[in-house]
Image (tube, grey):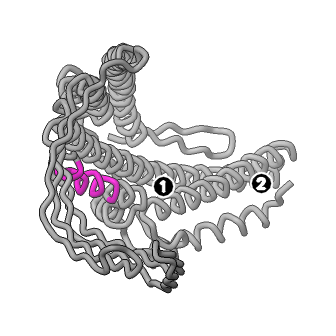
Amino acid sequence: MITKKIAFFIFCSIVFSASVWAQDAPMLTLKDAVEIALKNNYNIKLSQNNSTIASNNVTLGNAGVLPQVTGDFATTSSRQKTKQTRSDGTVNNINAHNSNNNYGVNLNWTVFDGFNMFANYDQLKTRDTLGAIRLKDTIQSTLANVITTYYDLISQTEQIKALKGAIAISHTQLRYANDKFQVGRASRLDVLNAQVNLNTDTANLVTQYQQFKAIKIQLNQLLIRDLQTDFTVADTIVVDDKLVLAEVINSAQLQNPAILSAQINKRLAEISLKQIRSTRYPQVAVTSGYTFSNNKTPAGFTLAQNTHGLNYGLTASINIFDGFNQNRREKNAKILIDNASIDAKQTRLNVEAQISNFFVSYMSGLDLIKLGQANVVIAKRTWIFPWKNISWVILLH
């Protein structure tokens, strides 16, 4: 069991360290915490990079609308020993070095693919929108964690103050119990009970400080800075008591990232069906190029040949039969659209349920605040002053 001297020493050490901390540590406002998180948080940076990638992908070339132009070069060489026996009986031995050089510019342009290229471009733009919504969701989630942690620190600070008050009362009760024991008006058991109460309050304060420091580390982690960075927080929480459930739900329908993401996923499923249907149409492409060719064949009928010129053409193909896979892919795509629609409805219902539950807690919290304010007024008007065996209740007016 913690003795009286040890408990007093622990209490004084905590109070002294807390007073020094309060004097030296800088104030971190909620606004500052939010700004630091927006600037430093890793999750936000990763989401920003992913959103930028999705934005960079929105190009006509990536969708397959623009032609592809390549510069090509090829060279081959060979050494051949040829022995020719002519009709007159003479023999001709040839040691030839053959070479073939080809180079030029080629163009390949798909001019029609069953409107798949336009569906691709629509898909890229939709994914860009989805990336922006996911970035917004990451920012909101991160800031929600920062705000919740910050307010938790405020709550922890108030609990520390309350525990300090409890320890002060326990000290007073222990002193009165000792005084009563000295004059024979109380037993040793009363003194021990008062000592146990003081020890319990002191242990609770130590635990509370431990929780407070752990939450500070958590907030520093969210802000991506030295985990041991010391700071103080504000001592009040501003409560908005004007929220209306219907207005909050309506705002969520238009702005909630989860609902918007589900709607976009449905749109992506519809685009996927268009891409699959595009394979029912002909695929038409234009090809063209300008080629240079340089051939040397000393052992042939022509010793050297140089050619250059323009080539062009048109290719077309259509899927006639693919083992009924086209129908299968279209059926599955329609089912995925139905799944996306169901998921969107489920997400909307889940968000409304969460908002409703939070709103119930919000209304209960407002009632508790009013009750707490009333208790503070009563506490300020009532003073219980223990003296010996008498409790004097003095009403302060």
Asked whether 282 or 250 is in front, the reply is 282
* Residue 36, percent from left and from top: 34, 66
- Quadrant where the C terminus sits is top left
Query: Where does label 2 land, which residue?
Result: 178
Which residue sits at x=30%, y=75%?
A: 302
Residue drawn at (63%, 55%), measured in percent from left and top? 205
* Spot occupied by residue 385 in the image (x, y as percentages of width and height): 55, 45
* Total marks in image: 2
- The location of residue 213, given as percent across then percent down, is 57, 61
Residue 259 is at least partly visible in this image: no
Q: Amino acid at mark 2?
A: Asn
Is most of the magenta stretch helix, strand or loop?
helix
SS at mark 2? helix
Mark whose residue sits in front, 1 or 2: 1
Q: Residue 53 in magenta?
A: yes
The residue depicted at 39 percent of the width and 53 percent of the height is 146
Question: Residue 268: horizontal and vertical position, in percent?
Answer: 28, 31
Q: Quadrant of the N terminus?
A: bottom right
Left or right: where does residue 229 sit relative to residue 147? right
Mark 1: amino acid:
Thr
* Residue 70 visible in the displayed image: yes
Measured in 3D between alpha carbons, the distance from the residue under mark 1 to the one under mark 2, in whole angstroms, is 32 Å
Q: Which residues are magenta?
A: 49-62
**Residue in view at x 49 percent, y 83 percent:** 92
- Residue under label 1: 157
Given residues 175 and 299, the one toward you in this image is 299
